[in-house]
Image: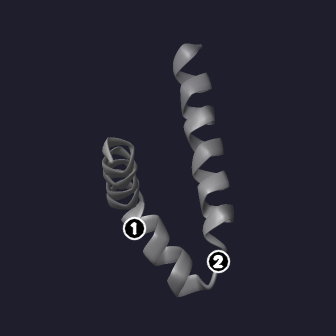
Amino acid sequence: MEELGGAVVRTVVWVGRNALAIGEAVLLGLDIKDVADHQRSERRRRRRRGSR
């Protein structure tokens, strides 16, 4: 049961963090997976830029 609670919390946190991107994807008719891939690449790029 605790595992389920943890999964719910992680899902709620993820949705909260990505609500804007999800809304934009829905409005533009994009695939949520494409949006997630784009966000991941943006985070990587920021991280790389920060380490230089």
Q: Which residue is drawn at 49% across and 76% down?
A: 24
- The local crowd at label 1, few if under 14, some if 14 to 19, many if 20 or more residues have their Cα within 10 Å, is few
Height in image: 19 above or below 3? Answer: below
Dot 2 corresponds to which residue? Answer: 30
For residue 44, side relative to residue 22 (left or right): right
1 and 2 marks in contact (CB < 8 Å): no
Q: Residue at x 55, y 38 (%)?
A: 43
Specify the quadrant of the image occupied by residue 15: bottom left
Question: Is disc 2 placed on a helix, strand or loop?
Answer: loop
Height in image: 27 above or below 33? Answer: below
Q: Tell me which numbered mark, 1 or 2, is placed earlier along the sequence.
A: 1
Residue closest to the eye, 13 or 24: 13
Q: Which residue is drawn at 56% across and 15% down?
A: 51
Name the residue type under label 1: Leu
Specify the quadrant of the image occupied by residue 48: top right
Q: Residue furthest front?
A: 1
Dot 1 corresponds to which residue? Answer: 20
- Tell me how the rendering is colored: one colour
Residue closest to the eye, 15 or 24: 15
Question: Is disc 1 placed on a helix, strand or loop?
Answer: helix
Height in image: 16 above or below 46? Answer: below
| Distance from the alpha carbon under mark 1 to that under mark 2 | 13 Å
Image spot of residue 18 (x, y percent): 42, 59
Residue closest to the eye, 42 or 26: 26
Q: Which residue is drawn at 39% across and 67% down?
A: 20
Image spot of residue 9 (x, y percent): 31, 50
- The local crowd at label 2, few if under 14, some if 14 to 19, many if 20 or more residues have their Cα within 10 Å, is few
Name the residue type under label 2: Leu
Q: Residue 43 carries which label?
A: none
Height in image: 13 above or below 25? Answer: above
Image spot of residue 49 (x, y percent): 58, 25
Quarter in which the C terminus is drawn: top right
